[in-house]
Image (spheres, rainbow, N blue to C red):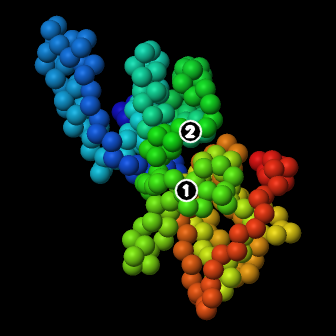
């Protein structure tokens, strides 16, 4: 009963983590048959075909991202810090769990599952998360929105690489724009229209001319006044994804692209 209570509390903590249902990736497992196919074939079958083949693939019920966190916390609560924990830490990273997310969840769980157990998890996690920056594949697993295609048509107005994924654009839907870490667009002006930015994943910045930069995290909404000179883009150490659309579009509406954001000005942003 005590363990069940611990796991329930930790599951609630996991449910509050920012990343939501990720892009579906079919889980396939062969470790059971490789290690125990002859010695315990039924166990191997249950491991590969039921646990991983069925339970882990119920992604419409719980994302791979969150299943990874629940599994890590379950192992931590039991004091299991062997190779199976490292495997699931590696899987969690591939499923889009960031170093910051893992650190926050394990720190929270330490008060319920035990401080020494948290130390053990962190010591192994440091071998897995050797960098704060996610790969493109890891970031895709952390967001429900597609990264899309390279934004080649506007590349000359960006420092770094960005991607576009129109969402029902033919019927007036928003466009999903993804920025690699440190990518940002040039200063620009939207004439005779208001642009709206909605951050959905990652962390970035928005800044109007001669004003302080505003940090954008999931849920941040920016309504950019017409004729306001501004830029927006990713933080130095984070991917950034926002939805964007224009409203109150007047006659002769259009974008005016201007100079790049000064490197020294950008570097002072944390």
Q: How far is the residue under mark 1 from the one under mark 2?
A: 22 Å
Residue at image position (42%, 22%) is: 87
Q: Residues within 10 Å of mark 1 (few under 14, many from 20)?
A: few
Question: From what the image shows, is residue 257 above or below residue 35?
Answer: below
The spot of residue 269 in percent (x, y) is: 79, 51
Residue at image position (53%, 65%) is: 243
Residue 20 seen in the figure: yes
Q: Is residue 173 left or right of residue 244?
A: left
The residue lying toward the viewer, choosing from 238 and 84, is 238
Contact check, label 1 and label 2, Cβ < 8 Å: no
Question: From what the image shows, is residue 12 above or below residue 166?
Answer: above
The residue lying toward the viewer, choosing from 165 and 143, is 165
Mark nearer the N terminus (1 vs 2): 2
Q: Which residue is mark 1?
A: 152
Question: From what the image shows, is residue 35 above or below residue 257?
Answer: above
Element marked by disc 2: loop
Q: Is residue 86 left or right of residue 161?
A: left
The spot of residue 128 in percent (x, y) is: 54, 24
Q: Residues within 10 Å of mark 2 (few under 14, many from 20)?
A: many
Total residue callouts? 2
Q: Which residue is mark 2?
A: 134
């Amino acid at each position: 009963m005590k363990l069940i209570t611990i796991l329930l509390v930790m599951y609630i903590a996991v449910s509050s983590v920012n990343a939501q249902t990720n892009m579906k990736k079919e889980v396939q497992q062969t470790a059971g048959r490789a290690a125990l196919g002859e010695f315990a074939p039924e166990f191997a079958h249950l491991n590969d075909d039921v646990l991983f083949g069925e339970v882990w693939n119920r992604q419409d019920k719980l994302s791979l991202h969150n299943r990874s966190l629940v599994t890590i916390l379950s192992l931590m609560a039991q004091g299991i810090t062997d190779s199976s924990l490292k495997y699931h830490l590696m899987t969690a990273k591939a499923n889009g769990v960031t170093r910051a997310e893992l650190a926050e969840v394990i720190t929270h769980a330490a008060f319920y599952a035990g401080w020494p157990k948290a130390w053990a998890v962190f010591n192994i996690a440091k071998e897995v998360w050797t960098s704060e920056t996610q790969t493109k594949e890891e970031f895709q697993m952390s967001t429900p929105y597609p990264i899309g295609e390279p934004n080649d048509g506007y590349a000359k107005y960006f420092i770094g690489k960005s991607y576009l994924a129109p969402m029902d654009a033919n019927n007036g839907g928003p466009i999903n724009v993804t920025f690699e870490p440190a990518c940002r667009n040039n200063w620009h002006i939207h004439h005779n229209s208001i642009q709206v930015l909605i951050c959905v994943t990652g962390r970035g910045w928005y800044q109007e001319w001669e004003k302080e930069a505003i940090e954008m995290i999931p849920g941040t909404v920016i309504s950019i006044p017409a004729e306001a000179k501004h830029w927006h883009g990713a933080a130095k150490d984070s991917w950034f994804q926002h939805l964007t659309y224009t409203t109150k579009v007047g006659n002769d509406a259009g974008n005016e692209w201007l100079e790049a954001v000064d490197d020294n000005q950008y570097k002072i942003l944390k």
